[in-house]
Structures are given as structure tokens and as C-alpha cells.
Image: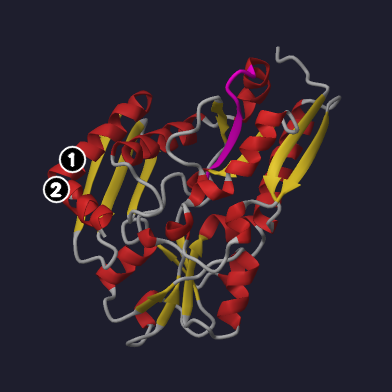
Amino acid sequence: MNPSPRKLVIASRESALAMWQARHIQGRLQALYPGASVEILGMTTTGDQILDSPLARIGGKGLFVKELEQALADGRADLAVHSMKDVPMNLPDGFALAATGEREDPRDAFVSVRYQRLEDLPQNSVVGTSSLRRQSQLQARFPHLKIESLRGNLQTRLRKLDEEQYAAIILAAAGLKRLGLESRIAQLIAPENSIPAVGQGALGIEIRADRDDLREVLAPLNHADTAACVEAERAMSRALAGSCTVPLGAYARIENSMLNMVGFVASVDGREMARDSVQGLPRDADALGRELAAKLIARGADRILAALNHD
């Protein structure tokens, strides 16, 4: 029987999507522990404040996590809720992932006012994305498109599209679905055509590593299949030193009790790409991730990464 906590404070970014995620976990916890007070501490992170530069240039997705971790370290919050794709592959010392929530749709979504499919975009159409991973895969398939940086929260990105700053934008389907904006999706892009970001669509719950009391409290929120898939994806990325400065993606799913994962590393322009897949038991998730990284290196991923780092 889990010990019932008296009070829990969840640290969250203040964007609409982050607050949806925090409220979702708040609701789950209140259902599990009806006697507990569960509060949300909303915070603005560095990543939310600097909107005029690509993420890769200003320090990566970890900028969305640092302030929340500080709140955990200070004792102002007990847990932080993150989109797993924003969580750096190596957590700082003193922090741990306590649970991974069930995954929403992991696919990328094509969003456009005028066009129904990526394939319909005319020559030199401007497509907005903040992701080098999406950019490289788009350029590989559609070299005639122009890719431009798109920052800001979900509502800001949709507004820029509606103002016709872009012919189309690419977003994570999970965020649109969670905010009730599924009707904005013109086309869901098959994972084999746009391999998702590591952890895309999954929620992670971070705590201080010394909070053993919380591990037990949060254990019911862990979705075993999602946790295994995300662990495999993160192991691959970690082995390749992946960050948002690297066009890299991985997608694992469990079918018939087997974990199947595809992954890639590419040059930003999509002209060079190493891609491969692995299959194995979910309990071997970490080893499978490392195996896929080794297969990608054998296909030239190390050369692509060296060229990216040299730039």
C-alpha cells in the first residue's frame, strides 16, 4: 500500500501545454490520494524567455528544465512534469526520473491553412519548424522546400501560420491533441517518414534522487511499455551524444511483446543520413538503444556527427 502524502507541489512551465500536462498529473495524483493537497507551481524558464534564437544556438532543450530542477533542489516543489523530448539525456547529479506516463500520439503533424499534405506544397514554400530533426528529414524528402525557424509556444506558432508567415508548420501531434486542437492537423506524418524525437508524446516526472518517499507515491503513474520505449530511445541518443543541436530521432514501440525501434542521424540538409532498426525484449531496452547507436555508427553516423560538431 502506498503511503498517502499530505501535500505535493508540482513544478511546471507556464505554457498552456505544460500546464495541461501538470494538471493531468495533478488529477491522477488527486484520484490516487484523495486526502492529499496537490498544487502546481508555475514557472517561466530561460527557454520560454529567449524566443529570437534557434534552441540549438542558445543551449538546447535543457533550458526548459533547469529552473524546475532548481525548485526541486530548493524544496519549493516535490516533482516536476516535463515533455520527455525536452529532458536532457543525462540528468544532473541529484535528480532522477520517477515515472514515465503513457504516451500520446508520437507522430509529427503537418499543419497548414491552404494545403492538405506535405506532398502538395509548391516549390520554395516556407515551412516552419524549430527542430533540426524535422528539418533534416523534410529536406531529404522535399529538397525544393524552404525551412525557416519557428519558436514560441503552440498558440504563437499557430498564430504565425494563420498570419501567413509560413505555408505550413510541423508540430508534435501530441501537443495539439492534448490542447483540443486536433482539428488543426491537416496530415499526420507516418513515423517512417518523420522519425519522432526521442521521448516525443511521453510525459516524465522528475524528482530529487534522495526522495525515496516519492518514488513509491509516483510508481502508479509509470506506464511500463512507454517507459521501456523511452528508455531505449534515450539510450540510443545518449550513446550518440544526442542533443537538439544534432538532427537525430528514434521511435520505439512494443508489438507482440517485442520492442521494435528505428533511429537515424542526419546532416542538417538531409543529404547524409544513417538509419537502422533493432528488435528485442522490452526488459533489454537500454542495451537495445546502445545496439542501435552502434549500428548507426557502422552506417556512418560518427562521420556525420563529427562534421556537425566541426561546424
Task: Say which mark, if any, is on residue 295.
Answer: 1
Mark 2: amino acid: Arg
Q: Is residue 30 above or below residue 217?
A: below
- Residue drawn 49% across and 81% down? 166
Q: Is residue 259 left or right of residue 42?
A: left
Q: Is residue 289 left or right of residue 33?
A: left
Task: Name the residue tied to disc 2.
Answer: 299
Query: Over which residues does the magenta segment extend?
Result: 202-211
- Residue drawn 67% across and 21% down? 214
Mark 1: amino acid: Lys
- Residue drawn 79% across and 32% down? 30
Q: Give the structural element (helix, strand or loop) at label 1.
A: helix
Q: Nearer the viewer, residue 170 or 270?
A: 270
Is 32 included in the stretch rendered in magenta? no
Q: Give the structural element (helix, strand or loop) at label 2.
A: loop
Q: Quadrant of the N terminus?
A: top right
Q: Is residue 140 above or below residue 286?
A: below
Is 206 included in the stretch rendered in magenta? yes
Please rate how many residues cluster around mark 2, counting C-alpha atoms within 10 Å: few if below 14, some from 14 to 19, many from 20.
some
- Residue drawn 37% across and 23% down? 283
Dominant secondary structure, magenta: strand
Q: What is the total number of numbered labels drawn onto the structure image?
A: 2
Q: Position of residue 104 (x, y in %)?
A: 54, 48
Q: Is residue 216 above or below residue 174?
A: above
- The answer for how far apart the CA atoms under marks 1 and 2 are is 6 Å
